[in-house]
Image: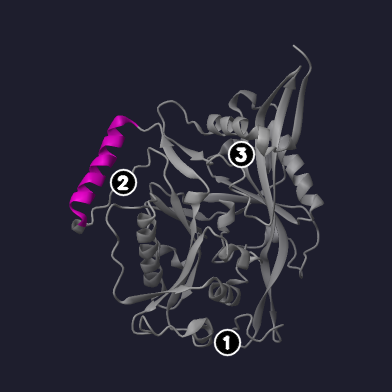
């Protein structure tokens, strides 16, 4: 055997794709007899990050003599997001931001934020420091591109990942949002007749989001790029039917100048074109029971029996983001929007609809989901890379208390 050398280098799509897919497959196979979730990248390992403003994928390649083998990989991306807010009586634009009861305007404070995702090390090459080398190298790229913070997300029971990032890489637990997942039934969900839903153009959606949500943590400064992306399936506003008729939408300016007592909004992202999911390792009994629920649901759709979609083969999903609203009936309105989104996912042949919200999100109770499929606490861990903010200062963001909401960017799922 020759000398063993580990090289961390940038991913090369022309020659690395098959090896990377093999590493992904080996890492996502669960223990024998247990179910696991596998992600099909549809032949494009960059699909989860390529829509971000700046992104990089690295591979760890082990050289033994003349032989080379990819044994690890990591993805990273950088964008500018809201990390806090400042209050000003005189805004840059009188119509750009919302005001409070004292006519003070809340202006967003932005920072350059990096995100680590898709860290994988082959099971046969773990406990060799490869994960640490990949994290160190991608953080070097973050710093070279002036990122001020870096964060990652993982399940709370992923002890290996949490140990690496919090004990060896200097990250601290920052936020614990919830991932809420609803299966797509064989029957359409009934949407209340007391709710009117209006579609917004990307331009209208941008105006609404910048005016109402720009001070929410993690709000992307380039929200226009998100809303104009081909994967965005639309933004929808819901109001009570007695507010506007289906033909009397006043336009976004009219809507914002005189907000209804209750309203809600969300946007829909098409994950089906980015990756497919598959539940592996399910027993024949579980598969048979799930199939039975689908058959009954299709034969008797008027009963509205919740059915389990076929998640035991590759399936698509939609992601709901930018959820928000206000007023005493906002929870019911967000529920209606989720029903609308469910029916759109059904029409597109998807098996699940998912979203991620803060644990303190007031509208969370209106989001339909199955607890068994959802994750109550998704751990977001953060590390400070730089000392200065690019726009104002709130001190160290990693030490700031959580707000009621977070804005989850669908480009980084």
Q: Nearer the viewer, mark 3 or mark 2?
A: 2
Instruction: Determine whether the residue tagged by mark 3 lies in a helix, strand or loop.
Output: helix
Please state which of residues 346 and 15 is positioned toward the viewer in this rendering: 15
Quarter of the rendering occupied by the N terminus: top right
Q: 103 or 182: nearer the eye? A: 182
Q: Which residues, given as a range, are shown in magenta? A: 283-301
Earlier sequence position, callout 2 versus callout 1? 1
Pointer 2: residues within 10 angstroms few (<14), some, or many (20+)? many
Residue 335 versus residue 90 in the image, above or below = above
- The answer to whether residue 293 is magenta is yes
Q: Quadrant of residue 103?
A: bottom right
Residue name at image x 58 percent, y 76 percent:
207
Pinpoint residue 338: horizontal percent, then vertical percent: 39, 63
User: What residue is drawn where x is 68% and y is 84%?
Assistant: 93
Could you say where residue 133 lies in the image, as x and y percent from the top left?
A: 74, 35
At mark 1, the secondary structure is loop
Q: Relative to residue 111, is residue 308 depicted above or below?
A: above
Q: Which mark is residue 308?
A: 2
Which residue is tagged 3? 161
Q: Is residue 284 left or right of residue 231?
A: left
Mark carried by residue 101: 1
Of callouts 1 and 3, the N-terminal one? 1
On the image, which quarter does residue 169 sit in?
top right
Q: How many marks?
A: 3
Q: Which mark is residue 189?
A: none
């Amino acid at each position: 055997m020759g000398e063993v050398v580990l090289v961390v280098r940038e991913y090369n799509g022309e020659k690395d794709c098959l090896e990377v897919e093999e590493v992904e497959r080996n890492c996502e196979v669960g223990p024998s007899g247990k179910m696991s979730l596998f992600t099909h990248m549809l032949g494009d390992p960059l699909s989860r990050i390529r829509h971000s403003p700046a992104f990089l994928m690295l591979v760890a390649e082990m050289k033994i003599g003349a032989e080379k083998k990819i044994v690890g990989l990591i993805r990273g991306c950088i964008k500018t997001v809201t990390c806090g807010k400042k209050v000003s009586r005189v805004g840059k634009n009188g119509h750009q931001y919302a005001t409070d009861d004292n006519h003070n305007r809340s202006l967003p404070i932005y920072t350059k934020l990096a995100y680590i995702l898709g860290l994988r090390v082959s099971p046969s090459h773990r406990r060799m420091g490869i994960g640490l080398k990949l994290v160190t190298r991608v953080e070097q790229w973050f710093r070279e591109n002036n990122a001020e913070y870096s964060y990652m997300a993982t399940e709370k029971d992923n002890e290996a990942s949490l140990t690496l990032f919090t004990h060896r890489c200097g990250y601290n637990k920052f936020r614990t949002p919830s991932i809420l997942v609803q299966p797509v039934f064989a029957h359409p969900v009934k949407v209340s007749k007391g709710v009117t839903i209006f579609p917004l153009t990307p331009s209208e959606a941008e105006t609404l989001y910048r005016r109402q949500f720009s001070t929410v943590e993690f709000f992307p400064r380039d929200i226009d790029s998100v809303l104009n992306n081909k994967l965005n399936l639309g933004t929808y506003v819901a109001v009570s039917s007695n507010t506007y008729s289906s033909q009397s939408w006043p336009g976004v300016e009219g809507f914002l100048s005189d907000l209804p007592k209750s309203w809600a909004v969300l946007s829909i992202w098409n994950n089906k074109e980015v990756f497919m999911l598959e539940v592996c390792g399910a027993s024949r009994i579980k598969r048979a029971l799930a199939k039975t629920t689908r058959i009954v649901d299709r034969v008797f759709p008027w009963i509205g029996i919740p059915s389990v979609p076929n998640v035991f083969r590759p399936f698509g999903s939609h992601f709901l983001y930018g959820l928000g609203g206000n007023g005493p009936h906002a929870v019911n309105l967000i529920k209606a929007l989720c029903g609308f989104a469910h029916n759109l996912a059904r029409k597109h042949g998807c098996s699940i609809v998912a979203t991620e919200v803060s644990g303190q999100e007031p509208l969370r109770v209106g989001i339909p989901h199955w607890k068994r499929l959802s994750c109550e606490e998704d751990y977001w861990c953060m590390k400070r890379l730089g000392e200065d903010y690019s726009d104002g200062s709130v001190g160290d963001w990693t030490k700031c208390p959580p707000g009621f909401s977070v804005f989850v960017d669908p480009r980084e799922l």
